[in-house]
Image: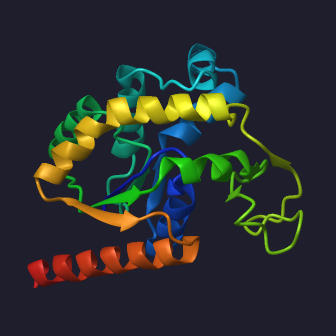
Amino acid sequence: MNIILFGPPGAGKGTQCIHIAEKYGLFKLSTGDMIRQEIKEQTEIGKRVQEIVESGQFPDSVLVNQMVAACVKRLKGSKGVVFDGYPRTLDQGLFLDELFEKIQFKIDCIIMLDVDEEQLIPRILSRFTCATCGAIYSEANQPKTKGVCDKCGGTEFVQRADDTEEVIRTRFDTYRRETEGIIQYYDQQGRVTHVDGNQSIEKVTAAIDRIIEEKQAELLREVC
């Protein structure tokens, strides 16, 4: 099963994608994680995109598409992939459709987290990640044991350098401007299921699980 999860910055896509990947045995493909790793390692790509990312903008689609294509082609034969932060633009969505047609994959489920942006700002400003495994926490979603990562037991946490209110608002503007087209494209095809992302993490997770499991049942009926 291949899943796309949409939502504005800070909507909880990363947390939900980790859950989806672990529960359903899917590969979590996060372009943000890919880019941040390139920046951390100060690769040629990382140096090119660091200034862009830290200003609240997004890298160009040509670069991102290349990274995604290389990753997806290695996943043939796997249980599937959950996309976190991709496709972000209509061009990227069309590229993904073409790529999947070539390798005989298909998008089975598209979920949109609808969240009030003003509620997201304090959530983003309070979030932090495990420096070892990248698990995401916030004031409302603390580790079960204070100072210890639930996932890997790490004790070092970091906050993203671009998590400032000014940059967050820029990211919101960019997201609306660039992502509206791809969401409308999928919505017009009747392929998007919307989830109220203003709910608690547990309720959002439960809603997503229901959607995925209903889709799994539907796919199973098609096979039978």
Q: Can the viewer see residue 103 in this picture? A: no
- Of residue 168 and residue 71, the one placed in the foreground of this image is 168
Query: Residue shown at 86%/73% (left/top)?
Result: 145
Residue 63 higher or lower than 48, as above or below:
below
- Of residue 63 and residue 206, the one placed in the foreground of this image is 206
Tell how many labels.
0
Residue 153 percent coordinates (x, y): 83, 65
- Colouring scheme applied when the structure was drawn: rainbow
Residue 220 percent coordinates (x, y): 19, 81
Q: Can the viewer see residue 28 in this picture? A: yes
Residue 71 percent coordinates (x, y): 42, 41
Query: Residue shown at 55%/33% (left/top)?
Result: 169
Check the image and name the residue furthest to the front.
118
Residue 48 higher or lower than 9, as above or below:
above
Question: Is 190 positioned to the left or the right of 148 in the image?
Answer: left
Residue 46 percent coordinates (x, y): 61, 21
Residue 188 higher or lower than 59, as above or below:
below
Image quarter in which the N terminus is found: bottom left
Question: Is 4 positioned to the left or the right of 141 in the image?
Answer: left
Query: Residue shown at 62%/16% (left/top)?
Result: 51
- Of residue 173 and residue 132, the one placed in the foreground of this image is 173
Quadrant housing residue 173: top left
Quadrant housing residue 4: bottom left
Quadrant housing residue 200: bottom right
Question: Is 10 positioned to the left or the right of 185 in the image?
Answer: right
- Of residue 217 and residue 193, the one placed in the foreground of this image is 193
Image quarter in which the C terminus is found: bottom left
Query: Residue shown at 34%/30% (left/top)?
Result: 178
Residue 95 higher or lower than 116, as above or below:
above
